[in-house]
Image (spheres, rainbow, N blue to C red):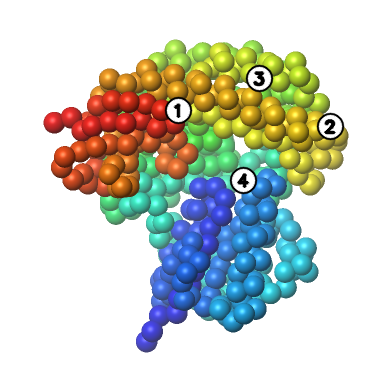
Amino acid sequence: MKKKKINVVTLGCSKNLVDSEYLMAQLRQNNFEVTYDSDSTDARVVVINTCGFIGDAKEESINTILGFADAKSKGYIDHLFVMGCLAERYKRDLEQEIPEVDQYFGVNNLSDIVEAVGGRYRDELTGERMLTTPSHYAYLKISEGCNWGCGYCAIPLIRGKHRSVPMEALLAEAERLVARGVKEIMVIAQDTTYYGLDLYGRRALGELLRRLCRIEGLQWIRLHYAYPAQFPEEVIEVMRDEPKICKYLDIPFQHISDGQLHAMRRGLNKAQTYALVEHLRREIPDIALRTTLLTGYPGESESEFEELLEFVRWGRFERLGVFPYSEEEQTYSALTLKDDVPQKVKLSRVDRIMALQNQISAELNQQRVGRTERVIVDRQEGEFWVGRTQYDSPEVDTEVLITSEEPLRVGDFYQVELTAAEDYDLYGRVRG
């Protein structure tokens, strides 16, 4: 019997990607032929997993839905389903505005989606995934939702309160991934440092990381989305002491001025932020810090923005992204604050931060020239093999463009001498 084809299109963050991978594992066990992120497939059923976090992401999700809705109206596909954050938040509006979609689902309706496309949800497959990343790395989502309630953020409205995945289930999932050839795991959540409080009455991320380190065959563990307020000391100790933990931390600070941090409801102040960065760099001298900043939040003055620029100059973050504030319905800032920073000013401030960061990144990369570092190879691209050091996460960070007289193997580690640097790329050759 010919398998029915289904195309799963994923938008947004790596947490969404994991949700799609869970869905696709269920679909494959229901005798579907599953493809993903394709606009040139003959699949007659399409599921779009949407993002609804900020304005640009919502626009991309809506445009993607409209494109497939048009394909359906022209007879290219038979059924169109939409899931994820945008559908969770705007289901009624979407049903009225884009009725071509057969059905909309939120973020916690995996079994309903499987049944809607004609399958049967199997509880015994919980934690099973069809990987869409290269086979040597994968994401491990350790919790859902968030309890912080930052002023600008709609995630608690969409995803709900923080809910940790039991540790034994996560370890079993990680072991299955490693058995399939995964060598690097990115630990993700809306806030990874909150892990365990709801289940165990304590922050248990440090224990989880130590137990992940005991998995034979797992070589790199990378930590993302670590909330800075009340940062657990045990996590710093694990990162310092465990060789499998990459000396890399994704920790979104958002701002530095006391006024802005208070307005954003971030739960810490300027002095605590500076102290945390100093502590991290003192305990883990070679750590690479990735942070995210938000500028143009209601009430941000020029002097507060100058404080933010000075923080970037001082912090010399190895990786940094910055976003202009966009008002999100029903968030604290939308309900209580006036969006009073002009869009032109917001974008100018983004450009000023990134110009500074480009200079810092170029200087930091140049300092690495001449070093030999361990690199994992992700792919071949033209004349180069493209890889990453422990200081870089896939898709978002610096890549190493490697030349080698002999073919390299994707997913293997090599000692690479760094020979040249640009703002966001390094060049190197394999050491014999």
Residue drawn 38% across the image and 84% down it: 2
Q: Is residue 133 left or right of residue 341?
A: left
Residue 221, image x and y in percent? 37, 36
**Disc 4 on helix, strand or loop?**
loop
Select label 4 or label 1 by which is in front. Answer: 1
Q: Is residue 19 visible?
A: yes
Select label 1 or label 2 by which is in front. Answer: 1
Q: Is residue 70 left or right of residue 370?
A: right
- Can you identify the residue that label 2 sits on? 340
| Crowding near the residue tagged with mark 2, few <14, some 14–19, many ≥20 C-alpha atoms within 10 Å | few
The image shows residue 301, relative to residue 34, as above or below, that is above
Cα separation between marks 3 and 1:
21 Å
Amino acid carrying label 3: it is: Leu
- Tag 1 or tag 3, which sits nearer the N-term? 3
**Disc 2 on helix, strand or loop?**
loop
Select label 2 or label 4 by which is in front. Answer: 2
- Can you identify the residue that label 4 sits on? 145
Looking at this view, is 423 or 131 the one in front?
Answer: 423
Cα separation between marks 1 and 2:
34 Å
Residue 357, image x and y in percent? 54, 24
| Crowding near the residue tagged with mark 3, few <14, some 14–19, many ≥20 C-alpha atoms within 10 Å | many
Q: Which mark is residue 122?
A: none
The image shows residue 334, relative to residue 96, as above or below, that is above
- Can you identify the residue that label 3 sits on? 308
Residue 171, image x and y in percent? 38, 46
Cα separation between marks 4 and 1:
35 Å
Amino acid carrying label 4: it is: Gly
Select label 3 or label 4 by which is in front. Answer: 3
Q: Which mark is residue 423?
A: 1
